[in-house]
Image (cartoon, helix red, strand yellow):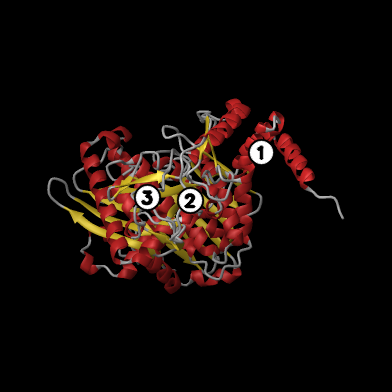
Amino acid sequence: MNGDAATAETHQFQAEVAELLNLMVHSVYSETDVFLRELVSNASDALDKVRYEAIARPELLAGDEKLAIRIKPDAVANTLTIADNGIGMDRQELVDNLGTVARSGTKAFLKGIKDAKDGLGLIGQFGVGFYAAFMVADRIVVTSRRAGTEEAWVWTSSGGAGFDVAPASPEQAERVRRGTEIVLHLKDDAARYLQPFELERVIRTYSDHILFPIELVDDKGEARQVNAASALWQRAKSEVTAEDYTQAYRSIANAFDEPALTLHYKVEGRQSYAVLLFVPTMPPFDLADPGRKGRVKLYVRRVFITDDAELLPAWLRFVRGVVDSEDLPLNLSREMLQNNPQVKQIRSGLTTRVLGELESCASKDADAWLRIWHAFGPVLKEGMYEDQERAAQLLALARFATTAGDTLRSLKDYVADLKPGQSEIYYLVGESAERLKANPKLEAARARGIEVLLLTDPIDAFWTMMPPEFDGKKLRSLSQGDVDFGEVPLADGGTEETKATGEDEAAILKTVKESLGEAISDVRASQRLTDSAACLVASDQGRDRELERLLARANRGSGAKPILELNMRHALVKAVGAAQAAGQAAEAADIAALLLDQAHILDGEIPADPAAFARRLNAFVVRGLKPPA
């Protein structure tokens, strides 16, 4: 019996954990090596933490200063033990850490792991860690003692609905003086993990660069170190292979994809620090977390300090890796991290170096850069809004969907293909490229063969408000302000009739404005439209229409009224004038309301009064129906 059965407490797993465990227990994945990498990684984190806490409290390591991870297979008992002498856990930490997944994105992970062909990759990418052990074990016993405390506790589960926590027996407490011991009772099909050569293969493949010794204990009780236990980032680049980098990335980032880019260098001079950074191939699951936290780990002289030092701006939070400083103090507090001038210099240097590496990739390998942009483009665009110092660099790196074709284009490509007489870069912001391509605000641009950027990420509505320029050309929204394409010839070589607004057209505009009242800020003749009757735009000084919609959803909209633009050549617009001239003011008002409602619908919005819209539309349709002969 493990622990004191008389005082054992039974707990239910958090719902998401229970579902996750069900997936692990009934796992059908052929490659289960991930479990060992995850447990070793957790043990390494625990050793990092106790070493850091011992800086202020050296007594935590007293009598047990050698930090290590021990792995012991027992073929007779059919168990595999992974033990560390790290920080350990008390009773509440066992309940919290091994009973819940306190992390946003859990539901997305669960859906992904059910749907994906490669569930193994998702396990590593999400970092569910401990629970992966249930792929190979039908029962797990965890004994842990928090550093500096007297009590040891035992957590036991068979992967069902719950787990037990009880005080450790004297034998267990004696065995775990500090840290954590995990005993896996292996399933029959996991017997290979009792073979020392198999364990050594997995460790060398996935955990060779863990900074602490990983010792494999044989059946005689003799231990030997099986990993390199060296800081790969401190080694010369000439000594490191591509495979070394890949495995280091997977270990550091808890990932299973390949790094798309690797940065490995040392800075020496006023400050000395080593850098090993990776740009992933696949977006990490925490990329959309509201906290927008980075995951670059800060070490000081090979001692882990934190992975929350914000060494890169939030718009580079997808970058993973390590920075190891020779100069920073070991006792860095959160306040010191935020205000320390040396940390600020490191932060600035890292950002410049990463951005330079991205620029190099974009210029030398267009296909590789497109893959990175597809994965992280929306995050990089955040920098175009937040970091004005680097906005121009990021804008040059950006790739956009456009009306010119199906491939993403750079602004350099766009400017090279400007039409004669075109002096601005045009864009339209919306929810999808398909809807934008059908937007009537593109009509005049399309008639002249003018390329338009189709911006569909939510951040696009924000960075475009700055307002940006590229190569001396302003970026102009087709849904904001006045647009004049008069200097650009029509694509078919024809000429467009242009004339000042006459008295009849002025009367139409006046009638529509009076009919719609406070629903709009103004009515004017459109230079954007060639086929459609009407569209809505924002004023030059106002927010872009899409930005206003996004803010309104968050109850932060300004309530600004749009401008209604009319195609004065359209029959429905002319019908307003005809009705007014015939003294049919009510009909003119109904047509004006229909024009406004149509414009809202074409922008993806619901008319202010759907019932009234349907009534007016039905009335006009019925009137237009001819009786059968």
Marks 3 & 2, CB-CB < 8 Å contact: no
Q: Quadrant of residue 598?
A: top right
Mark 1 or mark 3, which is nearer the start of the sequence? 3
Q: Position of residue 522 (x, y in %)?
A: 52, 30
* Image vertical order of residue 72 relative to residue 539, above or below: below
Identify the residue at image location x=71%, y=37%: 613
Q: Which quarter of the rendered picture does the C terminus lie within?
A: bottom right
Residue picked out by circle 1: 594
Q: Quadrant of residue 321?
A: bottom left
Amino acid identity at mark 3 = Glu
| Relative side of 243 to 96, left or right | left
Secondary-structure class at tag 1: helix
Q: Position of residue 541 (x, y in %)?
A: 41, 32
Viewer can see residue 87: no
| Relative side of 164 to 337, left or right | right
Q: Position of residue 590 (x, y in %)?
A: 69, 34
Residue picked out by circle 3: 487
User: In this view of the protein, which residue sits in the foreground, 326 or 448?
Assistant: 448
Marks 3 & 1, CB-CB < 8 Å contact: no
Secondary-structure class at tag 2: helix
Identify the residue at image location x=54%, y=46%: 101
- Mark 2 nearby-residue class (10 Å; few <14, some 14–19, many ≥20): many
Amino acid identity at mark 2 = Ala
* Image vertical order of residue 404 relative to residue 298, above or below: below
Mark 3–mark 2 Cα distance, whole angstroms, equals 12 Å
Q: Which mark is residue 393?
A: none
Viewer can see residue 182: yes
Q: Nearer the viewer's eye, disc 3 or disc 2?
A: 3
